[in-house]
C-alpha cells in the first residue's frame, strides 16, 4: 500500500512541476442574456508552473506560482495589476489555495521535499502555517463550510472522496475514483465532483450531510475541470474552447468562447468569482513560445534558463532516430561545457514552421568560428520541450 501511495504522490508532483502554464483572467459580460468573455489578460506572466486559480474576493485572485524553483501562493491584485506572494516555503511547495470561509486565512495543499503531503492553513498576514488534516493525504478539495471540506484523498486505490471535519478530525468516505474538481453548487447545500468510471466521467452532486449523490451530466472528452456560474450554469474547457451548460434549460453543452490565441490552445483549470462577473483559466504556453525561450537562453549561454524549457525526460535524436542524449542531467552536463567553451555561440532562425505541438526551425549556427546550417524539430508536451531531432 505504501509504495502505491508513494507512486501517486510522485505523480502528483511531477505532473504539476513538469508543466509550463499561465493564468488568464476574463470579464464575463451579459448582453441580452448572451454571455461573452472579454478583456483577456495574463495575470501570472511568469516562466514555469502557474496554476490552480481561485478568487479570494473580487479584487484578489489566488493561484500557485513558481518562485526560485518552488511553488508558492500568489495573489493578483486587480486594482494595482500586480502579483504578491503570501508565503515562501523553503522546503516544499503549495497547491490548490482557497480562502477559508468566514476567515481572512487561506488553505493549501503542501508537498514537502521529503514527500510529506498535507493540507495546511496559512495566516493571511504572516504566511505562517498550521496543519489542518494530520493523517490523510489530501490532493484536491473545496470548503463546504468553515469547518468541513470535501476532498480527494490519495489512497492505495487512487483518489477517493472524503467529507472531513477539520476541527474534530471526523471523516467519511462517500465516493471512489474521483477527479480533481470540487465546487459548491450555487444556491444549494450541495457540492459537485467528478466520478471516473472507465471511459465515462460524470459530474455528480453530493450532499455532505446525508452522503446522497446524484448524476448531473456526463462530461465530454474526459473533462474534469469545471466551475459554476451564479445562475447554476456549468462551465468547462476543452482544448481552445470554453463551453456552457445550464441544467435548467440546456440539453447539451454549448459554445461560450473559442480562442485563436496560440497560448490558449490547451485550457485546463477554470474558476469564477462568487457573483459570476469574472473567469480565470489556465493554459499551457504555445509550443512556439517555449521554443523561442530556449533559443534566447541558448544565445545567452544561460544553462539554467535553457534547461528550464525542457522536460525531465527530454530525448535528443540525430535524424532519423539515433538517440543522442536522454534526460535532463545528461543534457545539462553536455551543454554546460559547450556553453562555457563557445563564447561566439549564436543561432539565427532562417525559417520557422509551427504545426500542432511541433516547431521546425531552419537554423544558421555560429560556434567557435564556424558557421553551418541545421534543422531542429522540437516536440512540446505539457508546455515543455520533450523531444528534439537534429538534421544536418
Image (cartoon, rainbow, N blue to C red):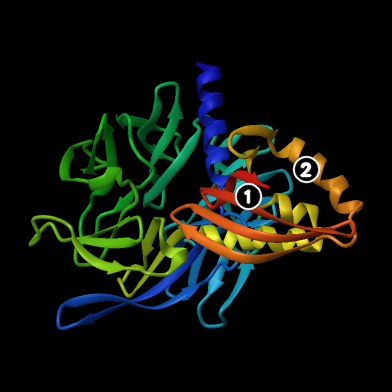
44 and 165: which one is in front?
44
Outermost residue on the top side: it is 1
Report the residue marked by disc 2: 332
Residue 154 visible from this viewpoint: yes
271 and 190: which one is in front?
271
Residue density around tag 2, few if under 14, some if 14–19, many if 20 or more, within 10 Å: some
User: Toward which corner of the image does residue 248 lie, by quadrant?
Assistant: bottom left
- Relative vertical location of residue 155 with respect to residue 82 in this rendering, above or below: above
Report the residue marked by disc 1: 129
Q: Which structural element holds mark 1?
A: strand
**x, y (%) of residue 189?**
23, 52
* Label ID, residue 372: none
**x, y (%) of residue 153?**
43, 33
87 and 241: which one is in front?
241
- Relative vertical location of residue 138 with respect to residue 182 in this rendering, above or below: above
- At 72% from the left and 43% from the top, the residue drawn is 91
- Relative vertical location of residue 168 with respect to residue 282 in this rendering, above or below: above
239 and 144: which one is in front?
239
- Disc 1 and disc 2: Cα gap in Å? 36 Å
User: Toward which corner of the image does residue 196 lie, by quadrant?
Assistant: top left
Amino acid at each position: 500500500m505504501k509504495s502505491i501511495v508513494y507512486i501517486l504522490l510522485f505523480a502528483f508532483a511531477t505532473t504539476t512541476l513538469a508543466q509550463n502554464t499561465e493564468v488568464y483572467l476574463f470579464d464575463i459580460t451579459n448582453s441580452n442574456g448572451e454571455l461573452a468573455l472579454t478583456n483577456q489578460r495574463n495575470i501570472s506572466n511568469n516562466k514555469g508552473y502557474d496554476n490552480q486559480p481561485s478568487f479570494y474576493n473580487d479584487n484578489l485572485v489566488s493561484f500557485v506560482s513558481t518562485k526560485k524553483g518552488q511553488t508558492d501562493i500568489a495573489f493578483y491584485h486587480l486594482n494595482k495589476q500586480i502579483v504578491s506572494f503570501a508565503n515562501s516555503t523553503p522546503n516544499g511547495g503549495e497547491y490548490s489555495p482557497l480562502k477559508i470561509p468566514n476567515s481572512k486565512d487561506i488553505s493549501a495543499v503542501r508537498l514537502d521535499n521529503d514527500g510529506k503531503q498535507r493540507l495546511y492553513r496559512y495566516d493571511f498576514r504572516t504566511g505562517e502555517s498550521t496543519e489542518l488534516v494530520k493523517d490523510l493525504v489530501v490532493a484536491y478539495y473545496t470548503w463546504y463550510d468553515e469547518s468541513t471540506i470535501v476532498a480527494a484523498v490519495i489512497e492505495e486505490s487512487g483518489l477517493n472522496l472524503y467529507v472531513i471535519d477539520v476541527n474534530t478530525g471526523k471523516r467519511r468516505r462517500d465516493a471512489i475514483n474521483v477527479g480533481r474538481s470540487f465546487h459548491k453548487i450555487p444556491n444549494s447545500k450541495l457540492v459537485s465532483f467528478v466520478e471516473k468510471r472507465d471511459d465515462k466521467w460524470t459530474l455528480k452532486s453530493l450532499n455532505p450531510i446525508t452522503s446522497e449523490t446524484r448524476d448531473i451530466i456526463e462530461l465530454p472528452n474526459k473533462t474534469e475541470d469545471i466551475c459554476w456560474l451564479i445562475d447554476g450554469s456549468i462551465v468547462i474547457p476543452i482544448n481552445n474552447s470554453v463551453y456552457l451548460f445550464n441544467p435548467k434549460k440546456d440539453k447539451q453543452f454549448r459554445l461560450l468562447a473559442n480562442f485563436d490565441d496560440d497560448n490558449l490552445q490547451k485550457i485546463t483549470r477554470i474558476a469564477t468569482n462568487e457573483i459570476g462577473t469574472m473567469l480565470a483559466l489556465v493554459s499551457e504556453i504555445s509550443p512556439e513560445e517555449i521554443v523561442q525561450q530556449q533559443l534566447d537562453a541558448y544565445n545567452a549561454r544561460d544553462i539554467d534558463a535553457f534547461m528550464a524549457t525542457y522536460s525531465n525526460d527530454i530525448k535528443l535524436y540525430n535524424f532519423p532516430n539515433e538517440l543522442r542524449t536522454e534526460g535532463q542531467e545528461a543534457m545539462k552536463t553536455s551543454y554546460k561545457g559547450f556553453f562555457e567553451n563557445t563564447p561566439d555561440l549564436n543561432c539565427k532562425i532562417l525559417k520557422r514552421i509551427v504545426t500542432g505541438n511541433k516547431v521546425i526551425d531552419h537554423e544558421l549556427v555560429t560556434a567557435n568560428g564556424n558557421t553551418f546550417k541545421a534543422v531542429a524539430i522540437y516536440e512540446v508536451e505539457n508546455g515543455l520541450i520533450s523531444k528534439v531531432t537534429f538534421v544536418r
